[in-house]
Image (cartoon, rainbow, N blue to C red):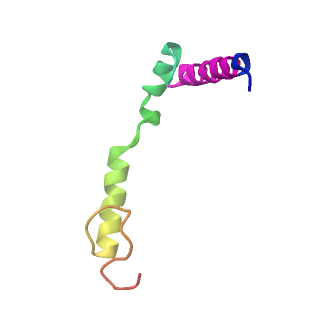
Amino acid sequence: MTRTLRIALAITALALLTSACASIGPKPWEKDLMARKEMSVNPYPLVAAADDHIYFSKEASSGGRGFAGGGCGCN
Protein backbone atom coordinates (compact mmCIF):
# COMPACT_ATOMS: atom_id res chain seq x y z
CA MET A 1 0.00 0.00 0.00
CA THR A 2 1.13 3.48 -0.58
CA ARG A 3 1.95 5.83 2.22
CA THR A 4 -0.99 8.15 1.52
CA LEU A 5 -3.42 5.24 1.61
CA ARG A 6 -2.06 4.12 4.99
CA ILE A 7 -2.36 7.63 6.36
CA ALA A 8 -5.92 7.91 5.03
CA LEU A 9 -6.86 4.59 6.65
CA ALA A 10 -5.29 5.64 9.94
CA ILE A 11 -7.20 8.94 9.95
CA THR A 12 -10.45 7.16 9.09
CA ALA A 13 -9.95 4.59 11.87
CA LEU A 14 -9.13 7.33 14.37
CA ALA A 15 -12.23 9.31 13.37
CA LEU A 16 -14.44 6.24 13.77
CA LEU A 17 -13.01 5.42 17.19
CA THR A 18 -13.43 8.93 18.54
CA SER A 19 -16.95 9.31 17.19
CA ALA A 20 -18.05 6.00 18.75
CA CYS A 21 -17.13 7.23 22.24
CA ALA A 22 -19.14 10.42 21.84
CA SER A 23 -22.49 8.66 22.31
CA ILE A 24 -21.73 6.91 25.61
CA GLY A 25 -24.03 7.79 28.49
CA PRO A 26 -27.22 9.80 28.68
CA LYS A 27 -27.44 13.37 27.49
CA PRO A 28 -27.99 16.09 30.12
CA TRP A 29 -31.64 16.51 29.09
CA GLU A 30 -32.22 12.73 29.46
CA LYS A 31 -30.98 12.48 33.04
CA ASP A 32 -34.32 13.51 34.53
CA LEU A 33 -35.90 10.43 32.97
CA MET A 34 -33.14 8.19 34.32
CA ALA A 35 -33.67 9.52 37.87
CA ARG A 36 -37.30 8.39 38.03
CA LYS A 37 -38.23 5.76 40.58
CA GLU A 38 -39.39 3.34 37.88
CA MET A 39 -35.91 3.32 36.32
CA SER A 40 -34.14 2.07 39.46
CA VAL A 41 -33.03 -1.53 39.83
CA ASN A 42 -35.61 -2.14 42.54
CA PRO A 43 -38.39 0.42 42.11
CA TYR A 44 -40.68 -1.16 44.72
CA PRO A 45 -38.58 -2.42 47.66
CA LEU A 46 -41.56 -3.44 49.81
CA VAL A 47 -42.98 -5.63 47.06
CA ALA A 48 -39.55 -7.19 46.49
CA ALA A 49 -39.17 -7.85 50.24
CA ALA A 50 -42.57 -9.55 50.35
CA ASP A 51 -41.67 -11.67 47.31
CA ASP A 52 -38.35 -12.65 48.92
CA HIS A 53 -40.13 -13.62 52.13
CA ILE A 54 -42.62 -15.82 50.27
CA TYR A 55 -39.88 -17.39 48.14
CA PHE A 56 -37.63 -18.22 51.08
CA SER A 57 -40.57 -19.51 53.15
CA LYS A 58 -41.67 -21.87 50.37
CA GLU A 59 -38.20 -23.08 49.47
CA ALA A 60 -36.88 -23.27 53.06
CA SER A 61 -33.66 -21.76 51.78
CA SER A 62 -31.64 -18.61 52.20
CA GLY A 63 -29.64 -16.54 49.76
CA GLY A 64 -30.37 -14.77 46.52
CA ARG A 65 -32.80 -15.68 43.81
CA GLY A 66 -29.99 -16.81 41.53
CA PHE A 67 -29.41 -20.01 43.51
CA ALA A 68 -30.95 -23.19 42.14
CA GLY A 69 -32.93 -25.62 44.22
CA GLY A 70 -34.32 -25.35 47.68
CA GLY A 71 -34.78 -27.24 50.90
CA CYS A 72 -36.74 -30.13 49.43
CA GLY A 73 -33.93 -31.52 47.25
CA CYS A 74 -35.89 -31.31 44.00
CA ASN A 75 -33.62 -29.23 41.81
Q: Residue at x 36, y 52 (%)?
A: 48
Q: 14 or 64, which lies in front?
A: 14
Q: Position of residue 32 (x, y in %)?
A: 46, 19
Instruction: Answer left or right for 41 relative to 15.
Output: left
Depicted 43 relative to depicted 60: above or below: above
Q: Quadrant of the N terminus?
A: top right
In the image, residue 74 above or below residue 22: below
Residue 1 horizontal side relative to residue 33, left or right: right
Q: Quadrant of the C terminus?
A: bottom left
Give the residue displayed 52% in from the left and 25% down from the top.
24
Q: Position of residue 2 (x, y in %)?
A: 74, 21
Q: Is residue 52 left or right of residue 23?
A: left
Q: Is residue 7 magenta?
A: yes
- Assess whether residue 32 is covered by the magenta stretch: no
Q: Give left or right: position of 24 versus 5.
A: left
Give the camera-side residue of 20 and 10.
Answer: 10
Provide the residue span drawn in magenta.
Answer: 6-24
User: Which residue is depicted at the point 34% across and 65% down?
Assistant: 54
Indicate the quadrant where residue 43 lies.
top left
Q: Depth check: give the residue in front, 22 or 29.
A: 22
